[in-house]
Image: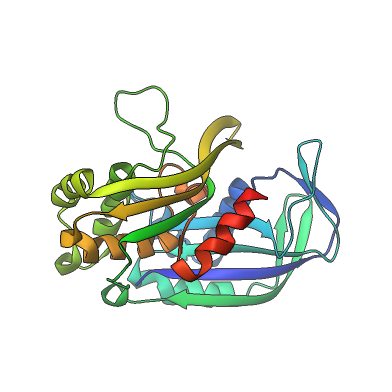
């Protein structure tokens, strides 16, 4: 079953960090597992792609980032959050045991106290298989897709690219009887899902000293043919654990599904 652990923190020092903290969170996670359980460390981080984990970068709670001269200014007492997702059933219990013992976290010059953790897990069989024919997605961190033979990344939430990437990740971790026919669903998406509206922006982040550009924002898909709706729904909800696109283990490609009742409020927020 996919597992996500949300950490809620209080900053104990003033600090200035890059606005995108995915690399810090990923390194913290790797080192934590390495020191706690070497066998688990090997199983998680030394296997072939796709990697069985993803992260949501550190972010402030209930307020915007204070950006000054390209740095996120954090003050002592600020409330923060980040998340770690794991996609393999066989390691969940070990991960939870390690995470529950974490009380203090350090990201470069920032020291944090763990106030609470929230554990979210669901069996693959129980991931929702129903979704509206109007699908609203929010890409919360920069997202990009690499295309073989193309020098520059693909910077658009095209249904074919999103579904191709998610179905590959999905099939790597679900029981065999839940695997999706990737060729069939990709062909179906090309004929049956229309991008009805979107509001996107590009953002540049730096990972291991390399600048990467991705898109963020909202998109509305309209499904014209319901033939593969159940499989599509599972992939979309699964993305809230797995992320989508390149460098998802660094916190790129964080995706959320928005339900109709929240969509008008969401549009207003993006238009401010």
Q: Residue at x 29, y 71 (%)?
A: 130
Quadrant of the image occupied by residue 62:
bottom right
Front-most of residues 133 and 91: 133
Quadrant of the image occupied by residue 88:
bottom left
Front-most of residues 189 and 107: 189
The image's colour scheme reads rainbow
**Where does the image place residue 119, in percent across and percent down from the top left?**
52, 77
**Where does the image place residue 135, in percent across and percent down from the top left?**
37, 59
User: Can residue 205 be seen?
Assistant: yes
Q: Eyeballing the image, is 195 above or below 102?
A: above
Q: Eyeballing the image, is 203 above or below 54?
A: above
Number of marks in picture? 0
Taking 252 as reference, is 114 left or right?
right
**Where does the image place residue 45, in percent across and percent down from the top left?**
43, 53
Q: Residue at x 74, y 52 (%)?
A: 65
Q: Residue at x 71, y 43 (%)?
A: 18
Taking 134 as reference, is 179 left or right?
left
**Where does the image place residue 259, in percent across and percent down from the top left?**
45, 67
Instruction: Look at the image and tell me in which quarter the N terminus lies.
Output: bottom left
Q: Residue at x 35, y 52 (%)?
A: 221
Quadrant of the image occupied by residue 239:
bottom left
């Amino acid at each position: 079953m996919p597992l996500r652990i949300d950490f809620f923190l209080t900053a104990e020092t003033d600090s200035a960090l890059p606005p995108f903290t995915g690399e810090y969170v990923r390194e913290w996670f790797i080192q934590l597992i390495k020191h706690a359980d070497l066998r688990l460390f090997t199983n998680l981080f030394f296997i072939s792609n796709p990697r069985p984990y993803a992260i949501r970068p550190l972010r402030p709670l209930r307020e915007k980032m204070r950006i000054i001269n390209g740095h996120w200014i954090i003050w002592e007492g600020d409330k923060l959050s980040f998340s770690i997702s794991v996609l393999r059933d066989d390691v969940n219990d070990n991960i939870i045991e390690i995470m529950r013992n974490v009380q203090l976290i350090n990201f470069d010059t920032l020291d944090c106290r763990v106030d609470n953790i929230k554990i979210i897990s669901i069996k693959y069989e129980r991931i929702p298989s129903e979704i509206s024919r109007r699908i609203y997605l929010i890409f919360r961190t920069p997202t990009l897709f690499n295309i073989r033979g193309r020098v520059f990344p693909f910077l658009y939430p095209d249904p074919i690219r999103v579904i191709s990437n998610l179905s590959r990740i999905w099939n790597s971790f679900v029981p065999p009887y839940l695997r999706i026919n990737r060729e069939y669903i990709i062909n179906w998406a090309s004929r049956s899902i229309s991008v009805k509206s979107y509001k996107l922006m590009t953002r540049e982040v730096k990972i291991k000293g390399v600048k990467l550009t991705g898109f963020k924002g909202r998109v509305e898909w309209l499904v014209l043919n319901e033939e593969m709706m159940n499989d599509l729904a599972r992939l979309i909800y699964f993305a809230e654990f797995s992320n989508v696109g390149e460098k998802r283990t660094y916190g790129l490609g964080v995706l959320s599904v928005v339900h109709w009742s929240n969509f008008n409020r969401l549009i207003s927020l993006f238009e401010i």
